[in-house]
Amino acid sequence: MKIEKLVITHKNNNLVDINLNIDTSLALVGESGSGKSLTLKALLSILPQDMSCELKINSDFDLIAGESVAFIPQNPFTALSPLTKIKKQFFVKELLIKELFDKVDLDYELLERFPPELSGGQLQRVLIAMALSISPKLLLLDEPTTALDPQTRELILQLLGDLQKKEHFKILFVTHDITSVKVLCQDIAVLKNGKIIESGKMSDIISSPKQEYTKVLIESNFVNREFRK
């Protein structure tokens, strides 16, 4: 799919003015305030009311959150209601939930538990199962492994990669973690001040970045600087 035009405006100022080609999996990287979160909100149709959005896409599906577009947030520990059993937080029948749990390698007994009783990795798998419940065409990932330990992070990334091959959804991955980007995404777009300054194949950009801004991001490994607030 191609996002041929995405312009987000606030008080006659363009905050984001980009186009993206999401062939299979695209990483969107940049500093805090560069426009990554606004891009996700625009695609989910949840921009603040004082912002306007112009969006033109070339795709075989419409961007409809909850129907063709699913979203996995950054922090699995705050994404679910802590006082509601896991099974009650799905909007599909229990038989389908169990099928989804099989796909993400979770035990059925977790359905009777409350979110605080699950580990971060288990909670993230629950969120992935929820996303899969709508059979999405596009999966939006907002730094989904930031709150996880390194071993769990690797397992979740491997799971997402395997699921993409089986389910054939496209991925737009916003992250500060260069390791996650390299593992899961084939392509990368570097965002600065609401504009794409460099994009291409992941291997090409990582090995030979053309922009100094991109070089700094790669060299910092997205660890030594704060990229999100």
Image (spheres, rainbow, N blue to C red):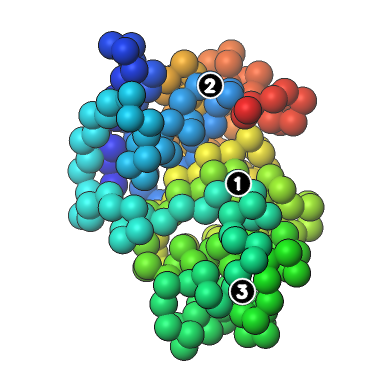
Q: Could you tell me which quadrant the C terminus lies in?
A: top right
> Dot 2: what SS?
loop
- Find disc 2 in the rendering and name its residue: 33
Marks 3 and 1 in Cβ contact (< 8 Å): no
Dot 3 or dot 1: first in sequence order is 1
Q: Nearer the viewer, mark 3 or mark 1?
A: 3
**Residue at horizontal 31%, vertical 13%?**
11
The x and y percentages for residue 31 are 58, 23
Mark closest to the chain's N terminus, 1 or 2: 2
Amino acid under label 3?
Answer: Lys
Label 3 residue SS:
loop
Up-down relation of residue 115 to residue 154 (above or below): below
Q: Secondary structure at mark 1?
A: loop
- Dot 3 alpha-carbon crowd within 10 angstroms: few under 14, some 14 to 19, many 20 or more: some
Residue 130 to residue 96: above or below: above
The answer to which image quadrant residue 203 occupies is top right
Q: Quadrant of residue 60?
A: bottom left
Residue 76 in view, yes or no: yes
* Amino acid type for the residue under numbered disc 2: Gly
The answer to which of 209 and 90 lies nearer the viewer is: 90
Q: How far is mark 3 from mark 1, CA to CA?
A: 21 Å
Judging by the rendered image, the residue that carries numbered circle 1 is: 74
Where is residue 41? Give x, y as percent.
Answer: 41, 38
**Which residue is denoted by mark 3 in the rendering?**
85
